[in-house]
Image (spheres, helix red, strand yellow):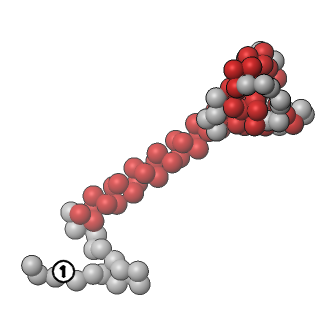
Amino acid sequence: MAALQNLQHEKFVQELVRGKGQGEAYLAAGYKAKSVAVASAAATRLLKDVKVQARLEELKAQAVERTVLTKQWVIDKLIQNVERAMQAQPVLDAKGVPNRRIPL
């Protein structure tokens, strides 16, 4: 699904995916409201729109995919650190030269 044609709707959904609350996302999208509570009520009505719901689910799914890749990167780096700590690989300096051990 492409971005929503209504730019305020698209901005609202993007702000929700970034972690803002409904009222905050509604206001960040450029809508006017007297308070965050009023904005939250209006946001609840906006979330009943089928296109808004579909776009929100799509963006959430994309965020999950990026998170999974990030978790894998962290796991890979942890494995590298364990291998270095167990001296399976020498620790290299910025130039790629193995660091010498300094006796205590």
In the foreground, 83 or 45: 45
Q: Which residue is painted at 78% across and 19% down in the image? A: 42
Give the percent coordinates (x, y) of residue 52: 79, 24
Name the image quarter holding residue 38.
Answer: top right
Q: Quadrant of the N terminus?
A: top right
Name the image quarter holding residue 88.
Answer: bottom left
Q: Which residue is painted at 34% across and 77% down in the image? A: 92
44 over 11 or under it: above or below: above
Which residue bears the numbered disc 1?
A: 101
Count neighbours of disc 1 (C-alpha within 10 A) and say few if under 14, some if 14 to 19, many if 20 or more: few
33 over 95 or under it: above or below: above
Q: Is residue 16 left or right of residue 5?
A: left
Give the percent coordinates (x, y) of residue 50: 80, 18
Label 1 secondary element? loop
In the foreground, 53 or 9: 9
Residue 42 visible, this orientation: yes
Give the percent coordinates (x, y) of residue 103: 11, 81
Of all residues, the one furthest to the front in this rendering is: 34
Q: Which residue is painted at 53% across and 46% down in the image? A: 69
